[in-house]
């Protein structure tokens, strides 16, 4: 049989808080990414478009444009929690979660549906496979013909769709950054054993969201299942030219581009089971949060002999495609530019990031692995995608929650 020949596209978009304050604005922002990728979609071979990490997280702002003047994500989230108290308080009390997780869970059914339907419609319209990036996603199951959400669970999850908009599979992020844990947006960690590989015409796809791509146990787990194309959706929440220090060694402070060489590039450079990797990175300031990076497609050195490199690193083979940063220069100059670009810098160059669309044509042997069966959660999402099921109506926890709060206050008297 003929080998698989296909194209991968990594989209590096810029986001703004206003892109998420309405369903219409979100759909327009997502469509703009596909329109930017349109010239690179192959007319004669399957194409996979890979979007960025947490591109569904800011949907928590939907309907909250009035609060953006508070300028920081923490203040805006607090204001939205109070404004939506009839929805957020019952979740907080009944599911015993933090206010920030309750805020996200309170509207998670509607936001998950908007996110998935938008990606489904774009996959169909543009005729492409899509790795939807990732979004905070509840765990669902089907129960008596309706969707039921597992209380309290909210993972950083990607969804992979085929050109018909049907669900191929999902993957949760296993290793969360401090900003994703209890002191930040408070997400639930995924489980390593739940990560699977999905054989498709556009590669045997394994997903390692952001920090997961730096972790040998994640990479080893995917390689053992036959992964040939690693998908690394990313949202690096810092200036690209700042110093990095993340678990397990936060004291090991390095330039972020140097640290990034330990993810996708290192995985494909060593010539193992994983032959290619696609690492799109979002840029832009979201209220007081800064996101920056250089998207890349990497592969074996002999397929990418041209010497390229992230800023502040030595050029090397292995980059099939690499987005340029905003400029080149000496490290100290680049660190200064990074500070200018960052949120609330007040500099004329604030938020002046560079967007990009990268593509590469890849070839792999014919696939010979079976597709893993859908999990109960994936069957529930597929039902959501096909509009055959709706979220289950819940008990009116508002009254029960307010009653519980009143009892708690009375006991403290």
Image (cartoon, grey):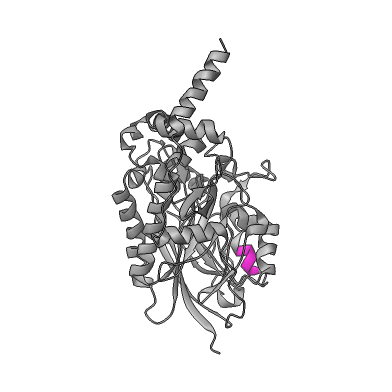
Q: Quadrant of the N terminus?
A: bottom right
Coordinates of residue 240 in the picture (x, y in percent): 51, 49
Coordinates of residue 192 in the picture (x, y in percent): 66, 56
**Which quarter of the figure has residue 60?**
top left
Figure check: 245 above or below 1: above
268 in magenta: yes
Look at the magenta stretch and give its main secondary structure: helix
Mark yes or no: residue 214 visible: yes
Q: Quadrant of the C terminus?
A: top right
* Residue at screen point 67% across, 68% down: 223
- Residue 41 in the figure: left or right of residue 405: left
Residue farthest top in this picture: 413
Instruction: In this rendered view, identify the residue nearer to me: 254 or 217.
Output: 217
Instruction: In this rendered view, identify the residue nearer to me: 347 or 387.
Output: 387
Residue farthest front in this picture: 144
- Give the magenta range: 265-269
Coordinates of residue 233 in the picture (x, y in percent): 51, 57
Mark yes or no: residue 310 visible: no
Coordinates of residue 286 in the picture (x, y in percent): 41, 42
107 in magenta: no
Instruction: In this rendered view, identify the residue nearer to me: 105 or 312.
Output: 105
- Residue 366 in the figure: left or right of residue 286: right
Q: How many marks?
A: 0
């Amino acid at each position: 049989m003929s080998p698989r020949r296909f194209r991968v596209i990594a989209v590096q978009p810029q986001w703004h808080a206003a892109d998420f304050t309405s369903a219409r604005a979100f759909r327009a922002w997502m469509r703009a990414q596909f329109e930017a990728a349109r010239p690179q979609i192959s007319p004669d071979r399957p194409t996979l478009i890979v979007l960025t990490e947490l591109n569904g997280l800011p949907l928590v702002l939907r309907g909250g444009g009035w609060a953006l003047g508070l300028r920081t994500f923490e203040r805006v989230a607090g204001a939205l929690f109070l404004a939506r108290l009839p929805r957020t308080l019952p979740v907080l009390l009944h599911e015993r979660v933090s206010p920030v997780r309750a805020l996200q869970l309170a509207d998670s059914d509607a936001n998950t549906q908007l996110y998935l339907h938008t990606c489904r419609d774009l996959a169909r319209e543009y005729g492409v496979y899509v790795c939807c990036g990732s979004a905070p996603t509840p765990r669902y199951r089907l129960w008596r013909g309706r969707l039921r959400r597992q209380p309290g669970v909210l993972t950083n999850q990607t969804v992979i769709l085929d050109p018909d908009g049907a669900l191929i599979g999902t993957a949760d992020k296993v290793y969360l950054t401090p900003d994703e844990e209890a002191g930040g947006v408070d997400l639930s960690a995924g489980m390593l054993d739940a990560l699977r590989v999905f054989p498709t015409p556009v590669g045997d796809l394994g997903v390692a969201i952001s920090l997961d791509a730096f972790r040998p146990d994640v990479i080893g787990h995917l390689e053992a299942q036959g992964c040939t194309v690693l998908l690394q959706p990313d949202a690096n929440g810092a200036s690209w030219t700042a110093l990095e220090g993340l678990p397990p060694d936060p004291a090991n402070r390095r330039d972020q581009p140097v640290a990034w060489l330990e993810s996708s590039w290192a995985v494909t450079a060593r010539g193992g089971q994983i032959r290619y990797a696609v690492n799109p990175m979002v840029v832009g300031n979201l209220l007081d949060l800064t996101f920056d990076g250089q998207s890349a497609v990497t592969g074996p050195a002999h397929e990418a002999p041209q010497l390229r490199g992230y800023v502040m690193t030595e050029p090397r083979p292995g980059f099939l495609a690499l987005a340029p940063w905003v400029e080149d220069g000496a490290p100290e100059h680049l660190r200064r530019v990074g500070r200018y670009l960052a949120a609330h810098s007040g500099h004329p160059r604030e938020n002046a990031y560079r967007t990009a669309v990268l593509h590469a044509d890849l070839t792999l042997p014919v696939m010979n692995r079976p597709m893993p069966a859908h999990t109960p959660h994936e069957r529930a999402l597929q039902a959501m995608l096909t509009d055959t099921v709706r979220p289950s109506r819940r008990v009116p926890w508002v009254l029960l929650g307010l009653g519980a709060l009143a009892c708690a206050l009375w006991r403290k008297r």
